[in-house]
Every structure is written in structure tokens, then in C-alpha cells.
Image: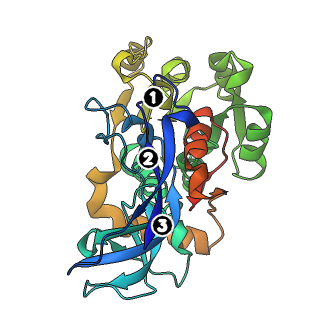
């Protein structure tokens, strides 16, 4: 049996291009004891993937040239030599950018599809999406009723969920996104109270107008100038949660730190960073809460699904350019 893969042909110089990748076909090895053959159904396009393309200095690890691009996915068992999984089971795992793969069964999670489709475990219930938003907004940011919350990259996968969680907890929510269409999406579909278009410029002034009493919690996915604009608009005792910094991922050797960090002591504020794996002991609670909000109609996960493994490189470029709304997935 064969698989088709999206592999790294050369390391990107700055912003990744479709030409940095290539599509190849390869034979799969026969199954050995403890292994499972998976038909990949959906792959998660996440910002961390960009940081794995740069070699040994990669912020989230690295990958070799000529190997499938790092990606989490959900798939269906075609054949199994592992006692815990049978043909037809839905699974989650580190499948990489390919149509089929052979992996050790102990690396896979069997998924419950009774209430949500398997791909929800990449989106609203996904570690890099819903669980990340939950950990940052609740466990780290300690969002509470009455807070004024600002979320950057609010129309992206993590941002969409973070905004909705803040609303569920009784906060006033302002999303930052690029373009009027995305800002309208945040207000009309994600329930934000206001939205700021960073492409229109003057972000600090726009935040001051939208939150005249200052922001209590800033959930940052972008870094750079957006982070400085938020720091300049903090209320006393504010919390800044560093979830990601996609504006910096194309040149990790020259990361720009915040120039207005002195606003933190001035306003008795705090800045906290996190990665979701530090909250693994809380995953079951997070999933239960998120699933409950979905069932109650309080939370939704917009999806942008790209068809075909051949389009995987285009999806990476789209993510880095902010061309998607909600969760970006590739269906190989």
C-alpha cells in the first residue's frame, strides 16, 4: 500500500512558500506487532508547524528535509496489530502530512465519536486549539465576569475559542483581526462586543476607544506591535497571557520583544506564558466543559477545510498570511 506525503524540500527563508515543499509517493512497510495502519482523514494546520521547519533552532522541535511535515491529525484504522484498536476505529495522533501512515498503537488515542465528529478533536476539543484556548483563558488568565478581555488573532482557531470562552465567563470581549470582513465575523458570529482591524493601523488608539477604562486581560497570539498596543492600554492589575507570537515565527533568530514592558510594573500588571502540555492533568475537565458548551449551543468551531494533501503547502502559507477563519484543516 502507498502513501502520498507533503515533505519539506528546503528550509524556508523567512515566510514559507509553496515551493519549499514537495509532494511524494512512497510504499508503506508491512505491519509489525503493536503497529496500526491509519487512513488519515484530517490534518491540523497549526502555527507551531512553522517553527519546526527551521532546523535545530526550531522553537517546537525540528524535522529533517525530505520527511513528512509535522502535523497532528485524526484518522481511521485500516488494519491493526495492536490490541487496543480495531479496524474502523477513529484515532488521534502525530500522523504527519500524509494520506496513510503506520504508527505504534501506543502513540494513538481512540476517539469517541458519539457526540462530536472525529475532527472536533483537532478543533474545539483539540490540544492545539480548544484546550490551548481554555488553558490560557481560564487556567492562566483567570478570566472572570466583568473583565474587559482582548484577544489577538481572534479570527483564528485558538482566538475564536478564546473569545467564546471569555463571553461564556461573563467578560466583555474585543477581538483583534485583519480586515473588516474578519471583524464583522467576530462581532456577528463569534459574539465579540467589538473588534479592531489591525490592518487599518493605529491599533493602540483603536483599543483605547473600544476599552476606555483599559483592558483587564489580554490573550496574545501575535506578539510584536500588537502586544505593545495592548500593554499601552492595560488597566491596573491586568493580566497578559502569552499563548503565541505568530508575527515572530518567520525569524526566530531575531525575535522582537515588547518595547513597552515597563507598563507592567507601572500598572501592577503581570505577564504569563504557557504551553498547553503543562496542563495535561486538566485535559479531561477541559474536554468535558468544552463539550458541554458545544452541546448547549454556547460554543462553536468555524472550520476552513482544504481538500487534498497536494494543498497542504498552500494551507501552511494561508495560515501564516492569515487567510483562514476558524480552524484550518487539510483533508488528505
| Sooner in the amino-acid sequence: mark 1 or mark 2 | 2
Residue drawn at the location 61% of the way across and 62% of the way down: 299
Mark 3 or 2, which is nearer the eye?
2
What whole-number distance in Å separates the C-alpha atoms at marks 1 and 2?
Answer: 13 Å
> Which quadrant does the N terminus fall into?
bottom left
The total of numbered circles placed on residues is 3
> x%, y% of residue 248?
45, 24
What whole-number distance in Å separates the C-alpha atoms at marks 3 and 2?
Answer: 24 Å
Q: Residues within 10 Å of mark 1 (few under 14, many from 20)?
A: some
Is 330 positioned to the left or the right of 103 in the image? Answer: right
Residue hosting label 1: 12
Q: Is residue 254 visible?
A: yes
Is 35 positioned to the left or the right of 109 in the image? Answer: left
By what rule are the colours in the image chosen? rainbow
Is 182 positioned to the left or the right of 217 in the image? Answer: right
Q: Quadrant of residue 110?
A: bottom left
Residue hosting label 3: 121
Say which mark, if any, is on residue 7: 2
> x%, y% of residue 146?
57, 44
> x%, y% of residue 269?
39, 26
In the rendered image of this protein, does residue 224 appear above or below residue 118?
above
> x%, y% of residue 212?
65, 24
Q: Secondary structure at mark 1?
A: loop
Mark 1 or 2, which is nearer the eye?
2
| Sooner in the amino-acid sequence: mark 3 or mark 2 | 2
Amino acid at each position: 500500500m502507498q502513501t502520498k506525503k507533503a515533505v519539506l524540500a528546503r528550509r524556508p527563508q523567512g515566510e514559507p512558500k509553496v515551493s519549499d515543499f514537495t509532494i511524494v509517493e512512497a510504499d508503506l512497510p508491512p505491519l509489525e506487532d503493536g503497529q496500526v495502519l491509519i487512513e488519515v482523514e484530517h490534518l491540523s494546520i497549526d502555527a507551531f508547524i512553522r517553527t519546526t521547519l527551521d532546523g535545530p533552532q526550531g522553537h517546537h522541535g525540528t524535522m529533517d528535509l525530505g520527511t513528512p511535515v509535522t502535523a497532528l491529525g485524526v484518522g481511521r484504522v485500516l488494519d491493526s496489530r495492536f490490541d487496543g484498536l480495531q479496524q474502523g476505529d477513529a484515532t488521534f495522533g502525530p500522523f504527519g502530512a500524509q494520506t496513510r501512515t503506520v504508527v505504534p498503537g501506543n502513540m494513538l488515542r481512540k476517539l469517541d465519536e458519539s457526540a462530536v465528529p472525529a475532527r472536533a478533536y483537532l478543533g474545539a476539543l483539540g490540544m492545539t486549539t480548544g484546550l490551548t484556548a481554555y488553558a490560557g483563558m481560564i487556567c492562566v488568565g483567570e478570566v472572570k465576569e466583568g473583565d474587559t478581555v482582548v484577544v489577538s488573532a481572534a479570527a483564528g482557531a485558538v482566538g475564536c475559542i478564546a473569545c467564546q470562552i471569555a463571553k461564556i465567563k461573563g467578560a466583555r470581549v474585543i477581538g483583534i483581526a485583519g480586515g473588516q470582513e474578519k471583524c464583522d465575523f467576530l462581532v456577528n458570529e463569534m459574539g465579540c462586543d467589538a473588534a479592531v482591524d489591525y490592518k487599518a493601523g493605529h491599533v493602540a488608539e483603536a483599543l483605547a476607544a473600544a476599552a476606555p477604562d483599559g483592558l483587564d486581560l489580554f490573550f496574545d497570539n501575535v506578539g510584536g506591535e500588537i502586544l505593545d498596543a495592548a500593554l499601552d492600554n492595560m488597566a491596573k492589575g491586568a493580566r497578559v497571557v502569552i499563548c503565541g507570537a505568530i508575527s515572530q515565527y518567520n525569524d526566530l533568530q531575531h525575535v522582537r520583544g515588547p518595547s513597552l514592558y515597563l507598563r507592567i510594573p507601572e500598572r501592577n500588571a503581570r505577564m504569563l506564558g504557557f504551553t498547553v502540555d503543562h496542563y495535561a492533568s486538566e485535559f479531561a475537565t477541559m474536554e468535558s466543559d468544552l463539550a458541554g458548551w458545544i452541546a448547549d449551543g454556547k460554543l462553536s468551531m468555524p472550520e476552513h477545510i482544504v481538500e487534498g494533501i497536494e494543498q497542504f503547502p498552500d494551507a501552511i502559507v494561508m495560515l501564516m498570511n492569515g487567510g483562514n477563519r476558524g480552524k484550518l484543516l487539510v483533508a488528505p
